[in-house]
């Protein structure tokens, strides 16, 4: 046997021994006369695969970035609302203090209007001093008059006394 015949016989025998089912399928296909075509898949090349991978990764990274951005935005909004509430509370305290301060200023203005001025106090002090001096002079006059009456009573008492 020649070498090609030996290879052909060995390949045939190996094919027969290795796959009886394939041989049966090949027999059916040849008996029908139509061989079904194997669908050809287009090879996904490196360029198309790279673009697809890039777009898929970019989309995933964008979605993750948007998610984290929304979370940060939510936290920032919460902090801002807390700050606004605190500011409103402080504003309410300040307005209450200002209202209280205005009422105290009104009371102070009313007291200033009711309190006598320094000139008025000086006038009243001068009048009181004059009255005091006048009363003191009247007291001295009254004492002198009482002393004079006592002297007269003593003279009369000596004159009316019995001499023995």
Image (cartoon, rainbow, N blue to C red):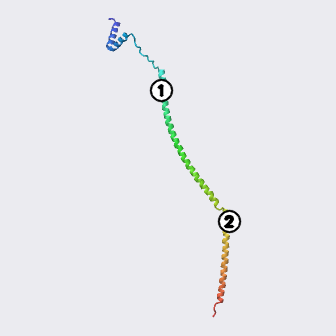
Pinpoint residue 8: horizontal percent, then vertical percent.
34, 8
- Closer-to-camera residue (59/133): 59
Task: Indicate which disc residue 56 carries.
Answer: 1
Residue that protrudes farthest toward the bottom in the picture = 164
Task: Indicate which disc residue 98 carries.
Answer: none
Pinpoint residue 151: horizontal percent, then vertical percent.
66, 84
Q: Secondary structure at mark 1?
A: helix
Q: Secondary structure at mark 2?
A: helix
- Closer-to-camera residue (51/99): 99
In this picture, is 25 found above or below 111? Answer: above
- Closer-to-camera residue (18/47): 18
Q: Earlier in the sequence, mark 1 or mark 2?
A: 1
The total of numbered circles placed on residues is: 2
The answer to which quarter of the image holds residue 121 is: bottom right
Pinpoint residue 106: horizontal percent, then vertical percent.
61, 55
Mark 2 Cα within 10 Å, few/some/many (few <14, many 20+)? few
Q: Residue at x 55, y 47 (%)?
A: 90
In this picture, is 116 found above or below 160? Answer: above
Residue under numbered circle 2 = 123
Considering the image in quadrants, where does the N terminus appear?
top left
* Residue 19 in sight: no
Considering the image in quadrants, where does the C terminus appear?
bottom right
Q: Residue at x 67, y 80 (%)?
A: 145
Q: Residue at x 68, y 73 (%)?
A: 134
* Residue 84 in sight: yes
Residue that protrudes farthest toward the top in the picture = 1
Relative horizontal placement of residue 95, taking residue 42 as reference (left or right): right
In this picture, is 81 found above or below 149? Answer: above
Residue that protrudes farthest toward the front in the picture = 32
């Amino acid at each position: 046997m020649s070498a090609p015949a030996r290879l052909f016989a060995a390949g045939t025998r190996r094919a027969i021994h290795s796959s009886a089912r394939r041989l049966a399928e090949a027999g059916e296909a040849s008996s029908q006369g139509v061989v079904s075509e194997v669908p050809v898949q287009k090879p996904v090349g490196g360029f198309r695969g790279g673009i697809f991978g890039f777009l898929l990764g970019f989309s995933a990274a964008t979605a993750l970035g948007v998610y984290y951005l929304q979370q940060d935005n939510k936290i920032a909004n919460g902090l801002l609302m807390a700050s606004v509430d605190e500011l409103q509370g402080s504003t309410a305290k300040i307005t209450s203090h200002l209202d209280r301060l205005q009422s105290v200023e009104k009371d102070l203005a009313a007291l200033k209007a009711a309190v006598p001025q320094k000139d008025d106090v000086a006038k009243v002090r001068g009048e009181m001093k004059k009255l005091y001096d006048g009363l003191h002079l009247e007291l001295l006059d009254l004492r002198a008059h009482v002393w004079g009456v006592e002297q007269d009573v003593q003279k009369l008492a000596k004159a009316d006394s019995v001499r023995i």
